[in-house]
């Protein structure tokens, strides 16, 4: 159990480092920059993750597992609105959508798809519960929330400053207020589709 816990801690450290490096240097950044940021050796990084594409796939998998944990925590909250808002804030805080620009650039795995769909099912439960409680704006879907979280996951091309965090916190609050049930006009357009959400991750060869 000790080694497994240590491996999980290392995974999260590498994931956090990769989010920071790729946000500031782009996805062409060398793996050595990720290793240096995480404080791990290149040898151990390659032994655990293999090639860069393997590392990126693993990072995506870890990010989705974090979203699953956030959704489960939200569902454990007896208050429907607090559970949904907590999910959004948690996902934004750890940069849930930071790896979204990888869509279509790496080959995906069945495990990635399973975790992605599990994450969305749990989010669907959060959204459905908030809707039944009458606290969610009519017409808002789970995929609306997923896209919203993803937009906040993008990082500036430098390390986040205290002022960046302040601005992001204000904008998240404004966005959450927009999700709350209140007299408001009908949302424009059609709800986002699962096909549209997933199509980005089709791997394009060449």
Image (cartoon, rainbow, N blue to C red):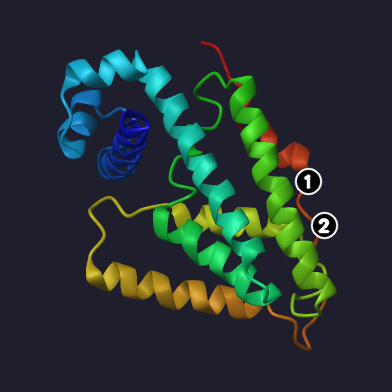
Asked if residue 120 lies left or right of residue 206, the reply is right
- Label 2 Cα crowd, 10 Å radius (few <14 / some 14-19 / many 20+): few
Look at the picture and state if 24 lies above or below 49.
below
The residue that appears at 32% across and 55% down in the rendered structure is: 156
Q: Which mark is residue 193?
A: 1
- Say if mark 2 contacts mark 1, CB within 8 Å: yes
Say what secondary structure mark 1 lies in: loop
Figure label count: 2
- Label 1 Cα crowd, 10 Å radius (few <14 / some 14-19 / many 20+): few
Q: Nearer the viewer, residue 42 or 166?
A: 42
Look at the picture and state if 164 lies above or below 116.
below
**Image coordinates for residue 171, horizontal then vertical, percent:** 47, 74
> Does residue 187 appear in the picture of this structure?
no
Instruction: Quarter of the image for the N terminus: give it.
Output: top left
Asked if residue 127 lies left or right of residue 190, the reply is left
**Image coordinates for residue 167, horizontal then vertical, percent:** 36, 74
The residue that appears at 19% across and 25% down in the rendered structure is: 32
> Does residue 53 appear in the picture of this structure?
yes
The residue that appears at 78% across and 67% down in the rendered structure is: 129
Residue of label 2: 190
**Image coordinates for residue 3, horizontal then vertical, percent:** 31, 29
**Image coordinates for residue 109, horizontal then vertical, percent:** 59, 20
Toward which corner of the image does residue 149 lie, by quadrant? bottom right
Say what secondary structure mark 2 lies in: loop
Given the current orientation, which residue lies at the most extreme front position?
1
The residue that appears at 26% across and 29% down in the rendered structure is: 29
Q: Nearer the viewer, residue 69 or 144?
A: 69
Given the current orientation, which residue lies at the most extreme top position?
206
Q: CA distance from mark 2 to mark 1?
A: 9 Å
């Amino acid at each position: 159990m000790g080694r497994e816990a240590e491996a999980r801690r290392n995974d999260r450290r590498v994931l956090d480092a990769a989010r920071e490096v790729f946000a500031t240097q782009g996805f062409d950044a060398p793996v050595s920059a990720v290793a240096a940021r995480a404080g791990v050796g290149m040898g151990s990084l390659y032994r655990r993750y293999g090639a860069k594409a393997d590392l990126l796939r693993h990072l995506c998998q870890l990010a989705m597992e974090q979203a699953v944990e956030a959704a489960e925590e939200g569902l454990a909250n007896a208050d429907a609105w607090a559970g949904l808002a907590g999910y959004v804030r948690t996902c934004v805080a750890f940069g849930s959508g930071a790896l979204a620009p990888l869509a279509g650039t790496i080959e995906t795995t069945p495990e990635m798809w399973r975790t992605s769909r599990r994450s969305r099912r749990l989010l669907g439960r959060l959204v459905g519960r908030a809707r039944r409680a009458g606290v969610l704006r009519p017409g808002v879907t789970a995929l609306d929330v997923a896209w919203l979280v993803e937009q906040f996951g993008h990082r500036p091309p430098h390390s986040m400053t205290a002022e960046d965090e302040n601005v992001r916190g204000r904008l998240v609050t404004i966005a959450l207020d927009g999700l709350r049930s209140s007299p408001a006009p009908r949302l424009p357009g059609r709800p986002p589709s699962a096909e549209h959400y997933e199509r980005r991750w089709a791997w394009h060869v060449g």
